[in-house]
Amino acid sequence: MIVKPKIRGFICTTSHPAGCRENVRQQIEYVKSKPKTNGPKKILVIGASMGYGLASRISAAYSCDAATIGIIFDKPSTGSRTASSGWYNTAAFEEFAHADGLYAKTINGDAYSQAVKDETIALIKRDLGKVDMVIYSLAAPRRTDKDGTVYSSVLKTVGEPYTNKTIDLRTNEVHNITVEPATDEEILHTVKVMGGEDWKDWIAALRAADAIESDAVTVAYSYIGPVITHPMYKDGSIGKAKDHLFKTSKEITEEFDGIRAYLSVNKALVTQSSAAIPIVPLYISILYKVMKAKGNHEGCIEQMYRLFNEKLFGGEPVTDSEGRIRLDDYELQEDVQSEVTELWSKISTDNISECADIDGYWNDFYKLFGFNVSGTDYEADTDVEVNIESI
């Protein structure tokens, strides 16, 4: 079939297998072009099919020559319906990794569940013995707890309603939006889904099963951002979850002797999650314009290669005064944020093309689903049925 993008709300309901494969190939080639990293060799990536998780797996495999086990929660194709982009990404990664002689296996299921933890531990012990790094990169809207309770996260402010500019991505119109504050229950739910509880559960399960090295490293991902986005992110419901994630990094380091846990604060990028947050897509599109002009714009793969090669394994880990790794360092440079703030103050529907990189935003959005990827023939008949070799 000929696959075209179909947009519904903040997601694309179709994915292009050839485009996803080419996108993965290009990320692999980027890492191959860079110096190797003397890093871990047996890595578990929880949330490995898109964005930072996928880029982490690629960087680990091709910079460190690491064996990787990835956990995804994706759908294969059914009839004329395409698979999810995460499924195609994972199939492509395994294809390339296996061709290059790298161990790569994937488990498809709910990473919050005990069943997936048990299956993963069994695979680690059978094939790798123990892992020496765990990357926690889940970005799920809901979580079913051990007792069957379902928690759903919300993207809201905290305390008082918040009004600022946003963009309607369907029309590129800039207008004001007021975001209502989350209730205490909604904050609790968001922390349950996006906080550190499940990350710590994973480390505890791995340690109890003797499936993690005594001196292993584990990393989870976060975002802080500038003052413009603080009411919606840093100080909002998702910020409360990220605070819990940071607190958990300290707990893991203290409670699991020898294991070092880090929170990596990354740059704002186009993801399925960020597209749904009011105010943030407008900020990202302005940020893209400024950083591309300065020549310091990075995507997921550049960020994750830098995490491995410069921040974590280039010597002693490079952290801020609170022990966090800062990959948002370029984003938060004073000259970058000064220009972003100036453009934010004057941006409107009429001048959006002058003040923001809307085309760049949309290009990255479509790439998430395998579209707009250079080197891909989108008029060609495409087989949407693609298998993941290890599943």
Image (cartoon, helix red, strand yellow):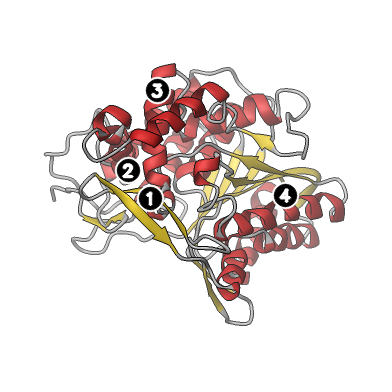
In the rendered structure, which disc, 1 or 4, sits on the residue that comes first in sequence?
A: 4
Q: Judge whether 41 appears above or below 338 on screen.
A: below
- The picture places residue 75, in percent across and down from the top left corner, at 36, 61
Q: Name the residue under label 4.
A: 129
In the rendered structure, which disc, 3 or 2, sits on the residue that comes first in sequence?
A: 3
The amino acid type of the residue labelled 4 equals Gly
Q: Judge whether 150 appears above or below 129 on screen.
A: below
Q: Name the residue under label 2.
A: 365
The amino acid type of the residue labelled 2 equals Phe
The amino acid type of the residue labelled 1 equals Ala
Viewer-side label of 3, 4: 3
Element class at badge 2: helix
Element class at badge 4: loop
Q: Mark 1 points at which residue?
A: 275
Q: Name the residue under label 3.
A: 292
In the rendered structure, which disc, 2 or 4, sits on the residue that comes first in sequence?
A: 4
Viewer-side label of 2, 1: 1
Element class at badge 1: helix
The answer to whether 217 appears left or right of 390 in the picture is right
